[in-house]
C-alpha cells in the first residue's frame, strides 16, 4: 500500500475520533421552547395583528365624532340657460340670456355632527370593547399555546424516561443472559432458560422502539406548536416547579373566573350588547348636524354678471324618522335577545369552570395517593428481584422466576413514571382551566 494512502487513512480516523457524534442534538428546556413560541409562533402573531386591527378601528370610529373638512370641485355643462324674452310692439324683439352652459364650482366644506341620538358614542364604545376583546384573546392564545407546549413536552419526557427504563432492564437481562450461557455450557441449566431471557429481551426492544417513536412524535408536536425545527432533545428532569396551589378550591375557582380569556370575552360581548341596544334606540331620536362651506365658482350666485366669484353657505340639518312600520323596534328586540343569550352563555361557562376545577382537584388527589402506593410497590418489586437473584446465584431459583420478577419491576417503574407525568399533565390542564401559564 502506498505510504500517502496510509497517512490519509490515519488522518480520517483521527478526525473521526475527535468529531462530535452526528446524533448529538441541543437540549432545550421547557422554558426555552415556550419563550421561543411566544416570539416566533404564528398563533400569537395572528392574535397581535387582530389586536392592532381592533385598535385602528377605535381610531376610525372616534374620527366620526370629530369635525371633518372636505374639498370638492365640479364642472357641469347645461344645454339650456335661463333668460328673458322682450317683445315690445313697434320695437325689435330681443332675448337676454343669463350665464352660460358651463358651470364651475370649487368648495371647502366643514361639517360636524351635533347630536346623533348617542349612535356615534355607542359605536366608539363598541369598537373600544372589541379592542379589549382582542387583547383578552391575545392573552388567552398565549396561555393556551404555553400550556399545550407544556403538555406535549411532558409527553416527550415520559417517552424519554420510558426508553431509559427499557434500556436499564435490557442491560440487566443481558448480564443475566451472559451468566446463563456460561451455565448452559457447563450443563447446569436448560436451553429453555436462555431462550426465555432472549424472548423477554426481544419484547423489551420492541417496547423500546415504540417509546422512541413516541418520543420523536412528541418532539414534532412541540416543534410544530413553537414553530421551530425538531432537531433538539428534551430534558429528562420532570421535577414539579409549578406555582399552582391546589389546596383551596375556592381560590382556584376565583382565579378561573378572573383569568379565563373566553369568559372575559363573553363579558365584553355583554357590554357590546348593551351598546348595540343603545345604538338601535338612537333611531327613536332625531339627528342634528351643522355644516359650513366656502365656495368659489362661475357663475356663482350672480347669473347676470356670469363671473368667477367666492361665497359661502352654512346651515343646520335635522333628520328624524317618525314611522318605519316597527322596524326600529324589531332591531332593538333583536339586540336584547342576543344580550340575554350572552348572559346565559356566561352563566353556563362559569358553571362548567367550577365543575372542571372540582374534577381536576379530585384527579390530582387520586394521582398523589397512587404515586405513594407505587413507590411502595417499586421498593417491594426491587426487594423481590434482589432476593430471587440471590437464590438464582445459589441455583435455587429458575430463570422463569427471575424474568417474572424483572417484568413486574419494569411494570411498576413504568407506572410510577406515568403517574409523575400524568400529575404534571393534570396540573397543566388545571392551569389552562383557570387561565394561567404553567
Image (spheres, rainbow, N blue to C red):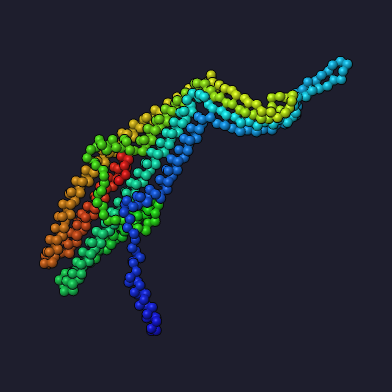
Task: Point out residue 19 in the picture as x, y percentages from the top left corner.
Answer: 34, 69
Q: Is residue 406 left or right of residue 258?
A: left
Res. 418 visible in picture? no
Say whether residue 434 is left or right of residue 332.
left
Residue at image location 19% in from the left, 51% down from the top: 374
**Image label count:** 0
**Image coordinates for residue 225, horizontal then vertical, percent:** 38, 50
Residue 245 place in picture, x, y as percent: 24, 42
Spot the residue most to the top: 89
Query: Can residue 87 be seen here?
Result: yes
Instruction: Between residue 69 and residue 385, name the one nearer to us.
Output: 69
The image position of residue 429, as x and y in percent, is 30, 44
> Residue at point 38% right, 38% down?
136
Q: Compared with residue 242, is residue 18 higher up or lower down, i.e. above or below? A: below
* 374 relative position to 18: left or right: left
Residue at the image point whose x is 43% and y is 36% from the top? 131
Q: Is residue 369 above or below residue 28?
A: above
Q: In which quarter of the image is the N terminus?
A: bottom left
Above/below status of 117 relative to 157: above
Q: Tell me the residue at 22%/46% (across/down).
A: 367
Res 408 → quadrant: bottom left
Nearer to me, 375 or 264: 264
Q: Nearer the viewer, residue 113 or 416?
A: 113
Amino acid at each position: 500500500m502506498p505510504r500517502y494512502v496510509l497517512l490519509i487513512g490515519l488522518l480520517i480516523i483521527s478526525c473521526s475520533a475527535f468529531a462530535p457524534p452526528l446524533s448529538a442534538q441541543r437540549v432545550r428546556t421547557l422554558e426555552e421552547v415556550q419563550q421561543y413560541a411566544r416570539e416566533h409562533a404564528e398563533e400569537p402573531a395572528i392574535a397581535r395583528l387582530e389586536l392592532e386591527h381592533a385598535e385602528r378601528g377605535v381610531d376610525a370610529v372616534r374620527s366620526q365624532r370629530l369635525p371633518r373638512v372636505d374639498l370638492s370641485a365640479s364642472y357641469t355643462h347645461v344645454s339650456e340657460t335661463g333668460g328673458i324674452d322682450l317683445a315690445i310692439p313697434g320695437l325689435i324683439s330681443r332675448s337676454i340670456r343669463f350665464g352660460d352652459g358651463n358651470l364651475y364650482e370649487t368648495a371647502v366644506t366643514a361639517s360636524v355632527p351635533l347630536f346623533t341620538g348617542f349612535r356615534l358614542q355607542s359605536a366608539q364604545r363598541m369598537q373600544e370593547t372589541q379592542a379589549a376583546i382582542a387583547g383578552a384573546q391575545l392573552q388567552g392564545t398565549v396561555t393556551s399555546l404555553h400550556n399545550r407546549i407544556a403538555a406535549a413536552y411532558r409527553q416527550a419526557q415520559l417517552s424519554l424516561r420510558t426508553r431509559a427504563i427499557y434500556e436499564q432492564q435490557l442491560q440487566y437481562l443481558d448480564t443475566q443472559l451472559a451468566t446463563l450461557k456460561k451455565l448452559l455450557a457447563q450443563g447446569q441449566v436448560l436451553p429453555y432458560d436462555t431462550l426465555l431471557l432472549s424472548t423477554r429481551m426481544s419484547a423489551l426492544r420492541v417496547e423500546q422502539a415504540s417509546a422512541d417513536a413516541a418520543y420523536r412524535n412528541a418532539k414534532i408536536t412541540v416543534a410544530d406548536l413553537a414553530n421551530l425545527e425538531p432537531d433538539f432533545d428534551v430534558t429528562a428532569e420532570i421535577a414539579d416547579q409549578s406555582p399552582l396551589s391546589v389546596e383551596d378550591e375556592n381560590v382556584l375557582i376565583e382565579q378561573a373566573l378572573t383569568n379565563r380569556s373566553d369568559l372575559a370575552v363573553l363579558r365584553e360581548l355583554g357590554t357590546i350588547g348593551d351598546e348595540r341596544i343603545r345604538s338601535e334606540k338612537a333611531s327613536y331620536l332625531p339627528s342634528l348636524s351643522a355644516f359650513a362651506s366656502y365656495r368659489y365658482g362661475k357663475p356663482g350666485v350672480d347669473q347676470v354678471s356670469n363671473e368667477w366669484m367666492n361665497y359661502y353657505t352654512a346651515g343646520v340639518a335635522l333628520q328624524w324618522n317618525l314611522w318605519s312600520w316597527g322596524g326600529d323596534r324589531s332591531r332593538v328586540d333583536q339586540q336584547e335577545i342576543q344580550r340575554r343569550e350572552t348572559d346565559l352563555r356566561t352563566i353556563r361557562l362559569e358553571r362548567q369552570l367550577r365543575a372542571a376545577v372540582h374534577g381536576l382537584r379530585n384527579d390530582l388527589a387520586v394521582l398523589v395517593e397512587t404515586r405513594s402506593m407505587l413507590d411502595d410497590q417499586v421498593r417491594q418489586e426491587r426487594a423481590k428481584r434482589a432476593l430471587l437473584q440471590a437464590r438464582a446465584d445459589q441455583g435455587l431459583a429458575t430463570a422463569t422466576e427471575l424474568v417474572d420478577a424483572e417484568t413486574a419491576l419494569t411494570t411498576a417503574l413504568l407506572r410510577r413514571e406515568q403517574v409523575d407525568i400524568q400529575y404534571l399533565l393534570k396540573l397543566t390542564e388545571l392551569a389552562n382551566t383557570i387561565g394561567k401559564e404553567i
